[in-house]
């Protein structure tokens, strides 16, 4: 496959990276495109969506800080505590930091901002009527921003007689791209990075070695996964402890960097694990609002089994003939925290 001259990065990719533009996979991507003439396409609906998501995440940070202050009021007496009170300027400052990082990332490319000139609303309404991706049923009936962005990309590709690498985690967006030969789909930044590197024959050689025997990567995942921060999605104050990994399945491996006797890969994996959960059953609570009194009498307690989808980066040394993976030199799981979804089956009297 030849290298596309233009790329489009969907909001879902920035969401997956948690807007960390200095992550290992983003840094590796920027390194390999440094001497390439690649155009970054930025449709207006996508730019607006990215900015909206940054604003929403900034608000989430404020809520986390407010909750921390409520749970530990003594933080207010800490002279370095950054959030004495809710202030719109704090949200503005957080958004500015994230937007500055975004603009620095964009600055590595020649950027083409796509407006609405080449967009056919009649064509988009045909997609809508036929429930063609990115439209669908339910909430997917409202995917007009994605549809307009897609139409803008198709218009650009046809006008400039070029192909576009579309990087997106959104399955419906990917399904829509399949209708157009000009749009080439990639599920991650790492997948596109691997394509750019693929002119080096060692890429396929070492990728096959790792796929045939990923034992070193699996071992590192089993060692590092329990060190994440675990919380229950129904109650952030629940105790989640004693994490044990039962099984690891590698779903995807991408080569993102090649050195003299080193290789860096990006991976995606599913981890089956167990955890001990202890969580209040708030339905058992007694409440007296006049006395500002709240008492929970029962709690869930026990070991649950759950799964987590993770991604990460591994840098490994290889043999001189590129046929043996020797050692993992650096390893990083991207997810710092993991949400547990399952509840213990048993409930107990909390004060026994």
Image (cartoon, rainbow, N blue to C red):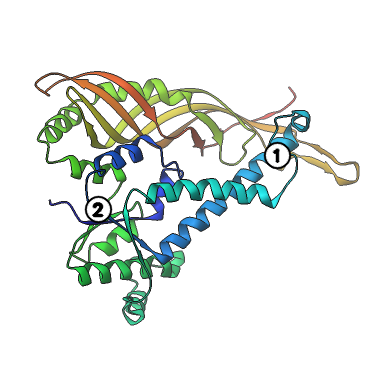
- Count every numbered label the image shows and give the total: 2
Indicate the secondary structure of the residue bearing disc 2: loop
Indicate the secondary structure of the residue bearing disc 1: loop
Mark 2 neighbour class, 10 Å CA radius: few under 14, some 14 to 19, many 20 or more: some
Mark 1 neighbour class, 10 Å CA radius: few under 14, some 14 to 19, many 20 or more: some
Q: Which mark is on residue 83?
A: 1
Tell me, yes or no, if residue 294 can be seen here. Answer: yes
337 to 167, vertically: above or below: above
The residue nearer to you, when weighing 202 against 213, is 202
Tell me, yes or no, if residue 140 can be seen here. Answer: no
Name the residue that disc number 2 marks.
Answer: 38
Q: Residue at x 21, y 71 (%)?
A: 158
The image position of residue 134, as x and y in percent, is 35, 65
11 to 158, vertically: above or below: above
Q: Residue at x 19, y 25 (%)?
A: 213
Image quadrant containing the C terminus: top right
The image position of residue 135, as x and y in percent, is 37, 68
Residue 212 in the figure: left or right of residue 106: left
Q: Residue at x 42, y 47 (%)?
A: 104
- Between the C-alphas of marks 1 and 2, the distance is 42 Å
Q: Which mark is on residue 295?
A: none
Residue 309 in the figure: left or right of residue 351: left
The image position of residue 65, as x and y in percent, is 67, 39
The residue nearer to you, when weighing 328 against 174, is 328
């Amino acid at each position: 496959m030849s290298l596309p001259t233009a790329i489009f990065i969907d909001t879902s990719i920035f969401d997956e990276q948690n807007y960390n533009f200095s992550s290992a996979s983003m840094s590796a991507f920027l390194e390999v495109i440094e001497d390439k003439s690649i155009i970054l396409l930025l449709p207006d609906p996508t730019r607006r969506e990215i900015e909206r998501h940054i604003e929403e995440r900034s608000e989430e940070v404020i809520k986390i800080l407010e909750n921390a202050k409520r749970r530990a009021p003594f933080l207010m007496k800490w002279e370095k505590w950054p959030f004495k009170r809710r202030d719109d300027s704090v949200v503005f400052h957080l958004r500015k930091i994230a937007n500055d990082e975004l603009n620095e990332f964009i600055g590595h490319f020649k950027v083409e901002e796509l407006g609405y000139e080449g967009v056919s609303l009649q064509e988009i309404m045909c997609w809508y009527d036929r429930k063609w991706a990115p439209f669908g049923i339910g909430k997917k009936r409202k995917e007009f921003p994605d549809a307009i962005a897609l139409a803008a990309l198709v218009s650009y590709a046809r006008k400039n007689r070029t192909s576009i690498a579309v990087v997106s985690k959104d399955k419906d967006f990917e399904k829509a791209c399949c209708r157009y030969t000009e749009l080439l789909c990639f599920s991650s930044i790492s997948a596109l990075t691997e394509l750019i590197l693929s002119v080096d024959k060692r890429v396929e050689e070492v990728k096959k070695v790792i796929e045939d025997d990923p034992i070193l990567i699996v071992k590192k995942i089993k060692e590092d996964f329990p060190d994440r921060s675990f919380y229950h999605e129904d109650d952030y104050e629940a105790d989640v402890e004693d994490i044990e990994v039962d099984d690891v399945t590698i779903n995807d491996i991408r080569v993102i960097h090649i050195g003299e006797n080193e290789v860096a890969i990006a991976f995606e994996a599913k981890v089956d694990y167990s955890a001990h959960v202890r969580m209040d059953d708030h339905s058992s609570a007694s409440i007296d609002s006049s006395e500002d009194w709240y008492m929970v009498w029962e709690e869930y307690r026990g070991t649950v089994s759950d799964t987590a989808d993770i991604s990460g980066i591994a840098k490994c040394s290889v043999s001189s003939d590129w046929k043996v993976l020797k050692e993992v030199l650096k390893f990083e799981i991207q997810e710092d925290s993991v949400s547990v979804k399952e509840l213990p089956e048993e409930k107990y009297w909390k004060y026994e």
